[in-house]
Amino acid sequence: MLLTEHGLYAASDPNGFRPLVVGTLPDGGTVVCSETAALNAVGATFVQDVAPGGLVVVDRNGLRIDHYTTKTELAVCSMEYVYFARPDSEIHGVNVHQARVRMGKRLAAEQPVDADIVCGVPNSSLSAAMGYAQASGIPYEMGLVKSQYVARTFIQPTQELRERSVRMKLSAIRPVVAGKRVVLVDDSLVRGTTALQIVKLLRDAGAAAVHLRISSPPLRFPCFYGIDIQSTHELMAANHSVADMRQILHVDSLGFLSVDGLERSVGLTTAAPHHGLCVAYFTGEYPTPLDDYAATLQDELSQLNIKVAEVSA
């Protein structure tokens, strides 16, 4: 996005990795932002999603939406639906909360377990936990509460800060979880920092068993499109089998949503690969050409992925 003396300019990359939407205010003003939730917050009316390769111009002549390239292919970052976006936002016509509920329902079908309660990790996992409870018939409970004054731990710059933030922001409700077999639903498993701390919270509160269910596939590959995941060394699923991760995290069982389950849960109506989603973090299939270093790394990671799959099997 660029603001000059002549006007406001905003563009979407040729794959539309990040959402970009346009709205109008009652007084005729124009709003350009990343989520429809921001339009609602300022009382703006949604106009449209900016398509991949789209160009928005707001100047003395008003609003114009054009494109700067036709060489495009939709590949929205799947983590927008899984984790980043607010649940009250819509991305290309898909409500984020409802997509996450569908993820939870598919997760329950793919990774069932016998348990007493389902609880989600506040806040981005609550929708998926609701879906898991609905599909499984296991009661949903608020087993964890979150302080609203601590930032997201995933984006903290160091491991020490991430661990400290988890301890500060979450606590278990002992009367809810004590003696119960708990299905703990989280949206993703990256470094394992958050999951390890939360499992300990539930164990210390008296949980009889903790079954960890992740409403996205195992995250094994780095991101070259804006997420701070630059190396496989920090990715738990890139270095351990599911069985090993279960032992490291001290959970009674561990299950992930499949890539197909994620794509179908989001449900973008498009003929683009992976139903218009970028799932490179899970598959290693990047939607854009990579430079020589990244291409070499991709080859190495593909071999690693094969080895991890063999161990998991």
Image (cartoon, rainbow, N blue to C red):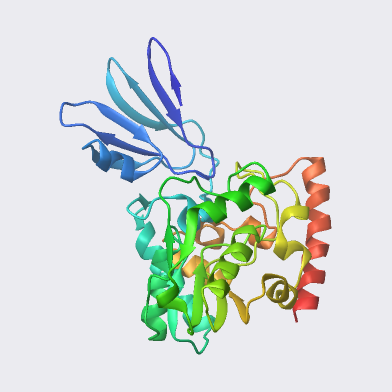
| The image quarter in which residue 280 lies | bottom right
**Left or right of residue 162: residue 13:** left
Residue 244 in which image quadrant: bottom right
Spot occupied by residue 105 in the image (x, y as percentages of width and height): 43, 76
Left or right position of 231 against 77: right
Query: Residue at (60%, 69%) from the top-left corner?
Result: 200
Image position of 6 with respect to 54: above or below: above
**295 vs 163, nearest the viewer:** 163
Residue 170, x across and y down, in percent: 49, 58
User: Is residue 105 at all visible to an observer of this figure?
Assistant: no
Q: Residue furthest top?
A: 5
How many marks can you see? 0
Q: Does residue 200 lie above or below 45 as drawn? A: below
Looking at the rendered image, the quarter that the C terminus falls into is bottom right
The picture places residue 142, in percent across and down from the top left corner, at 38, 70
| Residue 31 placement: quadrant | top left
At horizontal 43% and vertical 81% (from top left) the residue drawn is 117
Identify whether 23 is placed above or below 300.
above
Residue sitting at 27 percent across and 28 percent down? 30
Residue nearest the observer in this picture, 179 or 107? 179
Q: Is residue 195 left or right of residue 185?
A: right
Q: Is residue 248 visible?
A: yes
Instruction: State the residue in front, 286 or 194.
Output: 194
Residue 222, image x and y in percent?
70, 51
